[in-house]
Amino acid sequence: MSKLCQITGKKPMMGNKVSHANNKTKRIFNLNLSKKRFFIKKKWILLKVSSAGIKTINKFGIEKTLKKLNFNVKKKY
């Protein structure tokens, strides 16, 4: 499964790990993803959302957020 937030579209970022001697090696900054169930239109859907996505849903509501993103609820996720 991909490391992608289905609400915000955030992906892992690439960067450098910098040592005390200023040596640089590549590293990945992963997201804080979690699988969360939401109850919409008399059924549960499972979404992979980041913590920022959960905050967005808490602020605006799940139905308004999905409508803004043109998210198809009928499709199995």
Image (tube, helix red, strand yellow):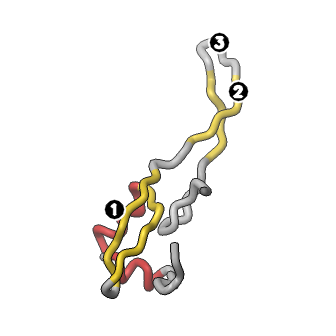
Residue beneath label 3, please?
Answer: 21
Asked if 35 appears above or below 12 in the picture, the reply is below
Between marks 2 and 3, how big is the CA–CA gap?
12 Å
**Residue at horizontal 49%, vertical 86%?**
74
Between marks 1 and 3, how big is the CA–CA gap?
38 Å
Position in image of residue 47 (x %, y %): 45, 67
Q: Nearer the viewer, residue 67 or 1?
A: 1
Label 3 Cα neighbours within 10 Å, binned few <14 / some 14-19 / many ≥20: few
The image quarter containing residue 61 is: bottom left
Asked if 6 appears above or below 12 in the picture, the reply is below
Label 1 Cα neighbours within 10 Å, binned few <14 / some 14-19 / many ≥20: few
Per the image, label 3 sits on a secondary structure element best described as: loop
Residue beneath label 2, please?
Answer: 25
72 left or right of 34 in image: right
Going by the numbered disc 2, the residue's amino acid type is: Thr
The image quarter containing residue 66 is: bottom left
Going by the numbered disc 3, the residue's amino acid type is: Ala
Going by the numbered disc 1, the residue's amino acid type is: Lys
Q: Nearer the viewer, mark 1 or mark 3?
A: 1
